[in-house]
Image (spheres, coloured by chain):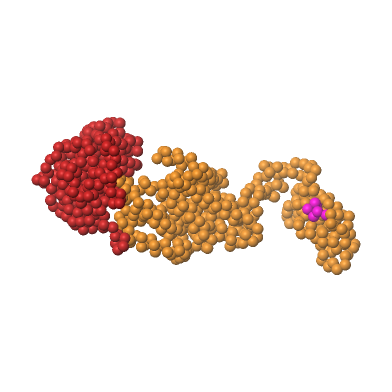
Chain colours: A red, B orange
Amino acid sequence: MNEPARVQKDFSNAPLCLSGKGVTKIFGFGDKKTVAVDHVDFEFHEGEFVSIVGESGSGKTTLSKMLLGLSNATEGEIFFQGKPRDIGSGHKKKEYWKGIQAIFQDPFSSFNTFQKIDTVLLDCINMRGGKGLSKEEKFNMMSEACHFVNLEFKELTNKYPFELSGGQMQRLMIARIFLLKPKILLADEPTSMVDACSRATILDMLLNLRDEIGMTVIFITHDIGLAYYISDTVYIMEHGKFVEYGKADEVILNPHAPYTKRLISDVPKIHEEWDLSTVDLKAE
Amino acid sequence: MKNTIKQVFHSPKFVGGFVIFVAILLTMIIYPLFNPGNPLQQVSVGTFARPGTYVSLYDATKATSNTLRLPDADEKRVAASLSAEDRVAMVEYFTTMGIDISELDTEDTDALLQMWDDNYDPSVRPKGMTSAKVNYYKRLNTSLQDLKSGDTLVIAEEVDGELVESKKITTTDYVRTGAVANVKTLPLGTDNFGRDVLKELVSATGTSILIGLIAGVVATLIGLTFGLLAGYVGGFLDDFIMFITNIFTVIPGFVLLILITYSIGQEQRGAAVVATVIGLTGWTWTARSVRSQVISLRNRDHVNLSKLSGHSLIRIILTDILPYIASYVVMAFILQVSSGILAEAQLSMLGLGPQTTKVPTLGLMMNWAMLYSAHTNGSWWAYFPVILVITLISFSLNLMNTGLDQVFNPTLRD
């Protein structure tokens, strides 16, 4: 496993940014009932880089949708900056989304293919109250955001998203966050659909962005190695529950839950023979 | 967008349908320029004049004539004058007289006349033949002899109560059609009211397409609005809209259409009213299918991102959902237009179409032809072209739809 890219900090005394008590999501009812997220508690602090790790179907994306306010929790309560979150009306939702933003897994489906890139970035400026700015000021802001993610706005203007590569689109997503400057960024497997070279660049950009804006990053991934590499705190999710959580070093270097151990053993090691004996096939 | 249009015009089925439809539209626009006037104007007295060119007899007699000696003119004249009944009567005479007719071809006028000349004897009265029949054969013989002798016709005018000869016409006198002042071509004859069928048909096609378009727009707008709202908003609104939609789905649309149009009454039933009613009863399938498309779209990342950008419901529906289902909506619209035209034809056949005195529609033309027994008296021109046009419009629209389906749904490509 590579050495972590971050300096381990203690966030336990930092103010709470987003927290939840007994958050549950149930789909269907009767025999068809599926508990996607099962009474989870969590505390994310300001400036913290949190990873939620789990395999497919463990409930990560469902939890992220609830955190974003895109779906309602069946039970439990979510607190934003220490107060119970209120997103009852369209106006309140809009206010909440000024504080929390997201980057999704698939850059190709994240953009409306019928809208030009300029529209996407202009929307962000308008959302931050920049409607009255002059054209030139807006252009400069968009150029700055693109520059932050190593893109040239002049080359992107008047282009449609499908004219860009996957890596470029995902970087544009980060540029969007740069313009919005939210308190929390929820990144739902943002690197799983881009190539290995773009992956490192995107992760570095996320870290830089966190440092630049001072926001909390909730990084959702199935790759525990990546989580160790990048995060301060790690939450391990299995069947809708957090089976283990804590500082990244503690959880990954000294795992207690069998599921965490299995996730760690599944990380491929380049210089070692792949030791199949560590994988419990019966458990599969 | 440009690429999509290019792709659409590379589909042979779409192009086929498009060409037929545009040809119909162009005819609708261009034909009235050459043949202006009210399409409901009566041009003939009496019903169902056969298709063809009509030359004014009066003007023909006044026109300067030339003498032409054509070798087969007499034959043609006799053949045209000898009706099918006359031919049958002649054969009957031969049989009564016990003459062998096994080698006679009744269509061969020369042979028939030759046999008649050889065998007809006015003095002989065959056994069992009535006096009326004997006299009929005498008259037939006289007219046949007259035809062959090529008598001169005398045109007389009435002057002070007396007939005065003004012109003699012989069998070799010919008049150029261009020299006759009044020549009218009626390519599809006239209908039961004596109206020019082609002119009426062109105008009716226009009205019917307009009815189809209005019905299509109304049905698509209602279906699209309901489908978008039900699919995107979900919850109670979805349940409510689907409840209404299901009610409309289970009541047979055509029965509903008949009841509504009947209750409106003949006086108020203009083409636009009928079209709107057709649209009001035909939106359910559009609503259901748009709803299911929207449900699959509403949880896509780009829609979530749009929500996170604080966009309003209307903006999300218009910019993030609608463009993605636009191709589907266009296809549904084309089908609605096609079924709107057919629904109008069906309604009009039942006598519930638009008011009959104002505009002709394809359905009304069929209705008139049916009411005046065009199909039983052999006046094919009154209804067959109408059927052909309805079929062509429907065929072209469905062909365009299939073509579009193949472009937008890659699994259907050949």
Report x, y in % for residue B405.
Answer: 46, 47
Picture residue at 57% right of the left edge, 54% below the top:
B387
| Furthest residue toward right | B123
Check the image and report above or below for B130 versus B206.
below
- In the displayed structure image, the side of residue B278 where residue A163 appears, left or right: left
In this view, the residue in front, B406 or B32, is: B406
Q: Magenta segment: does it hold B107?
A: yes
| Residue B117 in view (yes/no) | yes
Q: Quadrant of residue A186?
A: top left
| Furthest residue toward front | A277
Report x, y in % for residue B318.
Answer: 33, 48
Report x, y in % for residue A119.
Answer: 29, 40
In this view, the residue in front, A135 or A151, is: A151
Magenta residues (range)? B104-109
Picture residue at 32% right of the left edge, 48% below the top:
B300
Q: Magenta segment: does it hold B377?
A: no
| Furthest residue toward left | A13
In this view, the residue in front, A58 or B51, is: A58
- In the displayed structure image, the side of residue B292 where residue A15 appears, left or right: left
Badge count: 0
Picture residue at 51% right of the left edge, 48% below the top:
B399
Dominant secondary structure, magenta: loop
In this view, the residue in front, A198 or A87, is: A198
Q: Quarter of the image containing the N terminus of chain B?
A: top left
Report x, y in % for residue A65.
Answer: 25, 50
Check the image and report above or below for B145 versus B13.
below
Picture residue at 79% right of the left edge, 59% below the top:
B88
Check the image and report above or below for B57 versus B4.
below
| Residue A143 in view (yes/no) | no
